Amino acid sequence: MGERAHEILKIESNGPTWPSRLNEIDAPPESLWLRGDEDALARSGYIAIVGTRSPTPYGLDQARRFAMSFAAAGVVVVSGLARGIDAAAHAGALDAGGETIAVLGCGVDRPWPQGEVTRRVLEEGLLMSEHSPGTDPRPHHFPLRNRLISGLSAGVVVIEAAARSGSLITARWAADQGREVFALPGRVDQPMSRGAHKLLREGAALVEDPGEVLAELFGATQASEDTPLTKGDAVLEELARGERTADELSAATGVEVRALLARLVEGELAGLVTRGPGGLYRLTRRSSRGPA
């Protein structure tokens, strides 16, 4: 784990690095504790992705899909580090080479739950809390931390939630704060669809594609302008020779790493590329079959 992941930084509400969006919410915190990449607070675009701790495979796929697209567009993905949808959103943003912020209901020195996603956020993203170091997670902390998740963000995307869940609390905070609320529809016979469907009946925006959210919040210019992967692309040709890391692909093709990661995300969403352990990219069977 890098040295930055161990350092804890405290910022005050009147300081130069304070996220100004939090000044717009009710009961804003007076200070925040940070651990990780504090530069994530200097970005211009933030979107929250929240959902159930017990998602279906569909929900996990959609959380990853939306997070990867947001990150590829240069938007910071905000969530709560919980298992399920939150964890998939954080991981998806990092897989796309983007940034993510995990807002905690405990001290940043005691992130919960522990696991691979938490380790990755520590090393590659940012942990944030209004609770001082040494604070254990407590049930009443989590509904309150949800106001910070929505407060940081221009909008909140709800992906699978039970009829009564913390995700709906986040959506309520978002609506009260004047943030946009989006919900993905799900299967009508799936209990984890009921919360999102409830939000849709109450006026949340129905979304099916990450681009719809980006266009609504930031305009079309916020979306990635990098050329997506297509048949005959040099990146695909290099992957046809075997698995490669992003750095190896960049060296072989001359494409700058950040632009390359955005294109690889497009390739993943199109089903042409998959990312394996160790950050190794490879072609899928679909891409190897060639044009239909």
Image (cartoon, rainbow, N blue to C red):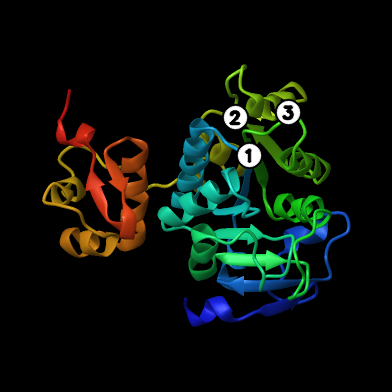
Residue 196 appears at what percent x and percent y?
Answer: 67, 29
Going from the N terminus, do you reach mark 1 or mark 3 first?
A: 1
Name the residue that disc number 2 marks.
184
Name the residue that disc number 1 marks.
157
Dot 3: element: helix
Give amino acid for label 3: Leu
Give amino acid for label 2: Leu
**Residue projecting furthest to the right:** 27
Name the residue that disc number 3 marks.
199
At horizontal 78% and vertical 69% (from top left) the residue drawn is: 131
**Relative to 257, 70 lies left or right:** right
**Relative to 99, 275 lies left or right:** left
Q: Is 99 rendered above or below residue 228?
A: below
Whether tag 1 and tag 3 are in contact, CB under 8 A, the answer is no
At horizontal 81% and vertical 46% (from top left) the residue drawn is: 177
Whether tag 1 and tag 2 are in contact, CB under 8 A, the answer is yes
Residue 269 appears at what percent x and percent y?
Answer: 37, 38
